[in-house]
């Protein structure tokens, strides 16, 4: 095989065809000719990968055949090991059958299967077993010729026989090297895990039988099979998962469904002209998947039978050549996205859903405080266009990039039941995030993932255009102010997008009975717009709290239950304690679910708008797999104690959910609304060097607390601490600058920690120093916040600080405490501790002298009570205070 220089091909991938743990397959172009080729690049991670690559190259050179893939050449340029293959115009047979929107004619089906079995028979004649026969490994060219590809799992029949006779070490009854292939196509003798059940020619015959029936019926194997064990998820599911399907194939003899007769048309369509030949081929498929390997026909027998069937089909079509056969006929489906959007109706005519949303009292207002400007809305269009590759310019020059991250897991349901999908993309000034929680299959969620950005851009642009043509002449009774029109754009566009997704999926070629719940968020520098239909949730991390922004649309919600009951549906409780519409589905709003639309299900989302504030940190979107097992309090704890990276936070939340036993697919999407690694630091403030606040202010605070019945040691201590921080900022007027903690040196980190009166002695490495530095920066920023909240309009003069008048209600306050404070400043650490103990308090929580002085003041308050017993230190202090008072009176 000819060796090719890898540098002759462009590094840009035209399209990725397949990606797995063993190889990447993609289309690229030749630098000189511009011709497109397919690169199958093997991932080399160990010596075994190298052997596997060389073995595949050897089989391709040894087993050349017109219906086996024939590479142009190979690349052996470490670290690149790849095959250069031709581009097959019609792609894989699996995609042609299930994603093209067309159906193959009966004669074309037989011709393709004839090609495949011819290639497979040639491999067996060369002593090679393919071991992964399936429609995804069959490629079809423009003329309808099929070739068998991917010999990555192939093995020499002689080597398998030798291994099975010589291997003697314990294996637990299972030879791992023979567990190859894809579950729906694997022979039952392999799935039973019987010792000595080597891969044989009969196993390839079984796999071909499954693929043959798939081609004839144009149905994914076992996709329509139902089990008697109903699984309680969002919807009552009776489909097989990996383990149940394995058991059914081996123990119950389950096989894919077959057409009773091809002489009867489907859906009112006329039967295929080659129906008799197709019926004969279906009977052949049933023989190929016999439970007894010895009863299966050999490949020469299958090839002979298909020769006869293809000849009959050609005769029925009135032609003697395959080249004259019609290949495809159109399906009665409409897959164009814009047609789907049009079918959904005029997006501006849909009124936003106004059902009340139950949120905590601390939640931000769901209605915008200020209407978005049209410039912001147009900026989103520019940003989304850039995301879709429709324009190269970002929406706003200099706008900050919102960092995004995600993590997803199938959980206990298994990888074959991963039905969650998500959309996550970010450009400067704009981010789009969405989570789709599929049920009863993943087709609907996958459709929404692919189509959401383009549909949203279409609807968003259309909504803006409608605002421009709306009546706006002065004096026109239909005049609508521009800011009112602008406020309608996001909700109108998001709602129309969800409806278009629903209608588009039902009309798409891949539509089935599956459905999904949907949650989408559009983030701009000033607002976050949300659309929710189903049981996914979005929470806002604002300041030190987590605020729930959406509600779950389930039958347990009174308003939703009333709505579906008004539509004629019933609501009942199943044995898992969940309320279900029609006894089947939990959610009342979703996309898809064609068989259940009569139950009053709606695809209209609830629209919410949140105005962003300076303390908004992130939004978290997740499917119910997370929220079913984690409380908002636990999620907030994870937010506060995880590295400030959206990827790390998403991973942490998902891991916690899995540890807590979630039994559902789980997807977590995180959008950081600000860079949490860049913190505001007050330069020049050393909190340990702050002087005490004015005693008049403290006295006024104490009187105010007394008047409201709030006088308590804890309350007063908290307020006093805020005053200390505020006075510290006032006495050291500090510039506020933004510092990237990750960019600081170890010395700078330690200096920052020391400024906040914190210790770094227990930090053993730089990551721990960075974590402690973030805490220190937060403490310093809190001091600034306290200052701004205590002194709303601070005014500095050369002599004094002007304070709010309500804090200056005691101009005649005694100077006794000031005198005591001065005395405390002269005490040693040992004397301060002794004074605190004399009042029955503990100095253990005091980290430095400033803390000890504050605790000593609290001790003096206790010792001032009539009848209190004084120790030597407090007695001396009060004696000094009395003498000073007498001197002042005499003066």
Image (spheres, rainbow, N blue to C red):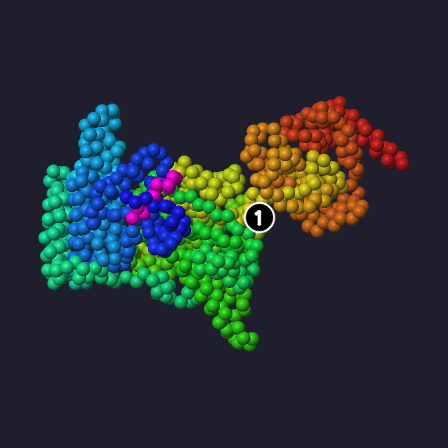
Q: Residue furthest bottom?
A: 475
Spot occupied by residue 474 in the image (x, y as percentages of width and height): 56, 75
Spot occupied by residue 682 in the image (x, y as percentages of width and height): 66, 43
Q: Residue at x 44, y 40 (%)?
A: 651
**Mark 1 lies on residue:** 615
380, 714: nearer the viewer: 380
Can residue 509 be seen here? The reply is yes
Pointer 1 local density, CA inside 10 Å: few below 14, some 14–19, many at least 20: few
**In-image side of 312 versus 776 (left or right):** left
User: Is 398 colored magenta in this rendering?
Assistant: no
**In-image side of 710 versus 342 (left or right):** right
382, 582: nearer the viewer: 382
Against 841, residue 500 (above or below) is below
User: Where does the magenta region start and end?
Assistant: 72-84
Spot occupied by residue 37 in the image (x, y as percentages of width and height): 33, 51
User: In the figure, residue 263 lies in which quadrant?
Assistant: bottom left
Spot occupied by residue 402 in the image (x, y as percentages of width and height): 52, 50
Examine the residues drawn in magenta and state their main secondary structure: strand
User: In the figure, residue 880 lies in which quadrant?
Assistant: top right
**Which quadrant would the C terminus be assigned to in this image?**
top right
Q: Residue furthest right?
A: 891
**In-image side of 182 versus 468 (left or right):** left
Q: Secondary structure at mark 1?
A: loop
Q: Residue at x 34, y 43 (%)?
A: 75
**Which quadrant would the N terminus be assigned to in this image?**
top left
Can residue 445 be seen here? The reply is no
């Amino acid at each position: 095989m000819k060796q090719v220089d890898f540098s002759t091909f462009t590094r840009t991938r035209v399209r990725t065809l397949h990606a797995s743990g063993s190889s990447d397959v993609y289309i690229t172009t030749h630098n000189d000719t511009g011709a497109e080729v397919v690169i199958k690049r093997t991932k080399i991670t160990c010596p075994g990968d190298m052997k596997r690559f060389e073995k595949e190259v050897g089989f391709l050179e040894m087993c050349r055949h017109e219906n086996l893939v024939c590479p142009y050449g190979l690349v052996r340029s470490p670290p690149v090991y790849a095959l250069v293959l031709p581009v097959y115009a019609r792609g894989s047979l699996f995609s042609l059958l299930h994603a093209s929107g067309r159906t193959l004619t009966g004669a074309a089906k037989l011709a393709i299967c004839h090609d495949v079995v011819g290639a497979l028979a040639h491999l067996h004649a060369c002593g090679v077993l393919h071991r992964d026969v399936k429609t995804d490994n069959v490629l079809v060219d423009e003329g309808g010729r099929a070739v068998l590809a991917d010999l990555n799992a192939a093995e020499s029949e002689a080597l398998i026989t030798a291994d099975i006779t010589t291997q003697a070490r314990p294996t637990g009854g299972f030879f791992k090297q023979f567990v190859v292939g894809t579950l729906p196509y694997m022979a039952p003798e392999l799935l039973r895990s019987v010792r000595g059940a080597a891969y044989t020619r009969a196993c390839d015959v079984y796999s071909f039988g499954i693929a043959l029936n798939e081609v004839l019926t144009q149905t994914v194997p076992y996709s329509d099979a139902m089990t008697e064990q109903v699984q309680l998820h969002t919807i009552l599911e009776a489909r097989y998962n990996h383990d149940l399907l394995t058991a059914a194939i081996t123990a119950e003899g389950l096989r894919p469904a077959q057409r009773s007769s091809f002489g009867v048309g489907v859906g009112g369509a006329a039967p295929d002209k080659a129906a008799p030949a197709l019926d004969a081929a279906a009977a052949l498929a049933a023989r190929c998947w016999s439970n007894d390997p010895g009863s299966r026909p050999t490949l020469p027998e299958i090839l002979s039978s298909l020769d006869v069937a293809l000849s009959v089909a050609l005769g029925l079509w009135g032609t003697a050549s395959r080249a004259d056969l019609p290949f495809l006929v159109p399906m009665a489906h409409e897959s164009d996205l814009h047609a789907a959007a049009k079918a959904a109706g005029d997006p501006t005519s849909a009124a936003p859903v106004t059902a009340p949303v139950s949120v905590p009292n601390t939640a931000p207002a769901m209605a915008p405080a200020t209407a978005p400007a049209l410039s912001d809305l147009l900026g989103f269009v520019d940003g989304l266009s850039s995301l879709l590759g429709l324009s190269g310019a970002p929406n706003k020059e200099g706008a900050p990039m919102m960092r995004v991250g995600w993590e997803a897991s199938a959980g206990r349901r298994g990888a074959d039941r991963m039905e969650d999908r998500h959309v996550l993309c970010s450009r400067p000034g704009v981010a789009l995030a969405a989570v789709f929680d599929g049920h009863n299959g993943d087709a609907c969620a996958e459709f929404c993932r692919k189509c959401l950005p383009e549909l949203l851009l279409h609807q968003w642009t259309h909504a803006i255009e409608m605002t421009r043509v709306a009546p706006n002449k002065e004096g026109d009774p239909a005049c609508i102010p521009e800011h009112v029109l602008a406020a309608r754009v996001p909700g109108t566009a998001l709602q129309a997008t969800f409806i278009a997704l629903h209608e588009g999926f039902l009309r798409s070629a891949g539509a089935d009975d599956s459905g999904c719940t949907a949650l989408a968020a559009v983030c701009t520098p000033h607002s976050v717009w949300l659309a929710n239909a189903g049981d996914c949730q979005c929470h806002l991390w604002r300041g030190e709290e987590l605020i729930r922004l959406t509600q779950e649309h389930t039958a347990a919600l009174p308003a939703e239950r009333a709505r579906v009951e008004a539509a004629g549906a019933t609501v009942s409780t199943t044995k898992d304690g969940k309320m279900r519409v029609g006894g089947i589905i939990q959610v009342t709003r979703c996309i898809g679910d064609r068989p259940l639309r009569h139950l009053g299900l709606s695809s209209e989302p609830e629209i919410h708008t949140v105005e962003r504030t300076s303390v908004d940190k992130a939004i978290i979107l997740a499917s119910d797999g997370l929220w079913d097992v984690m409380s908002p309090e636990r999620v907030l704890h994870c937010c506060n104690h995880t590295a400030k990276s959206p990827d790390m936070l998403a991973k942490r939340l998902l891991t916690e959910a899995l540890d807590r036993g979630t039994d559902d697919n789980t997807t977590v999407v995180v959008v950081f609304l600000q860079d949490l690694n860049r913190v505001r630091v007050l330069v020049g403030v050393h909190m340990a060097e702050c002087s005490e606040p004015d005693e008049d202010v403290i006295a006024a605070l104490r009187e105010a607390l007394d008047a409201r019945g709030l006088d308590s040691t804890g309350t007063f201590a908290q307020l006093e601490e805020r005053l200390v921080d505020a006075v510290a900022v006032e006495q050291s007027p500090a510039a506020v600058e933004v510092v990237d903690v990750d960019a600081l040196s170890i010395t700078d980190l330690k200096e920052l920690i020391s400024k906040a009166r914190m210790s770094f002695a227990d930090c053993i490495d730089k990551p721990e120093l960075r974590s402690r530095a973030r805490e220190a920066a937060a403490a310093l920023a809190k001091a600034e916040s306290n200052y701004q909240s205590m002194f709303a309009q601070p005014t500095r003069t050369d002599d004094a600080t002007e304070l709010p008048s309500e804090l200056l209600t005691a101009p005649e306050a005694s100077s006794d405490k000031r005198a005591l404070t001065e005395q405390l400043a002269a005490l040693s650490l040992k004397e301060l501790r002794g004074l605190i103990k004399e009042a029955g308090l503990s100095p253990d929580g005091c980290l430095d002298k400033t803390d000890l002085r504050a605790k000593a003041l609290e001790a003096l308050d206790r010792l001032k009570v009539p009848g209190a017993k004084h120790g030597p230190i407090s007695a001396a202090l009060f004696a000094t205070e009395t003498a000073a008072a007498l001197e002042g009176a005499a003066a």
